[in-house]
Image: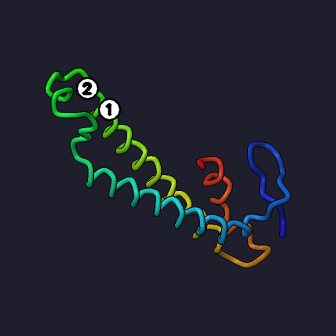
Amino acid sequence: MPGITLLGRRWQAASDDFVIPASIDAIFRATLVLICYVIYRLYPSWDCFDQDVADDETWSGRNGIRALLALCSILLLSEVIAAVLLAGESSKGGIMDVHARRFVSPLLAFR
C-alpha cells in the first residue's frame, strides 16, 4: 500500500486506512449535531434569569448564544459531510489502486 502525499510530504498512512476512523468520526459528530439541534429546539428563549431581571433587558446575550449554537451545528454538519466523503473515497478500489482514491488527500487537507 503506497503512502499518501499531503502538503508536499509523503505520509506512511495508506489512503485506504481511513474508512473506519472517518465513519466513527461521522457518527460521533452527527450525534453532536443532533444534541445541538435538541438544545436549540428545547430552549428557544434562553430565559436564564428571573422575570424581573429579564424585563430590564440588561442581558441581551440570548440571541448570541442561539447564533453560536447554530454556527456550531453548521460547522459540525460540514465536518460530518467531509467525514462521510472521506470514508467513501477511502473505500474505493483495491489495495494498490491509488487512482481510485485520488480525492483522499484533498479531503484530508480540507478537514
The residue drawn where x is 59% and y is 69% is: 23
The residue drawn where x is 30% and y is 29% is: 61
Q: Is residue 110 left or right of residue 67?
A: right
As shown in the figure, which amino acid type bears the numbered disc 1?
Answer: Gly
Q: Is residue 101 left or right of residue 85?
A: right
Mark 1–mark 2 Cα distance, whole angstroms, equals 8 Å
As shown in the figure, which amino acid type bears the numbered disc 2?
Answer: Ser
Q: Quadrant of residue 46?
A: top left
Q: Quadrant of residue 102?
A: bottom right
Q: Which residue is mark 2?
A: 60
Q: Is residue 82 left or right of residue 97?
A: left
Q: Is residue 23 left or right of residue 42?
A: right
Q: Are marks 1 and 2 in contact (CB under 8 Å)?
A: yes
Residue density around tag 2, few if under 14, some if 14–19, many if 20 or more, within 10 Å: few
Which numbered circle lies on residue 64? 1
| Quarter of the rendering occupied by the N terminus | bottom right
Residue that extends furthest to the left in the rendered view of this protein: 55
Please say if 3 is above or below 50: below
The residue drawn where x is 39% and y is 61% is: 34
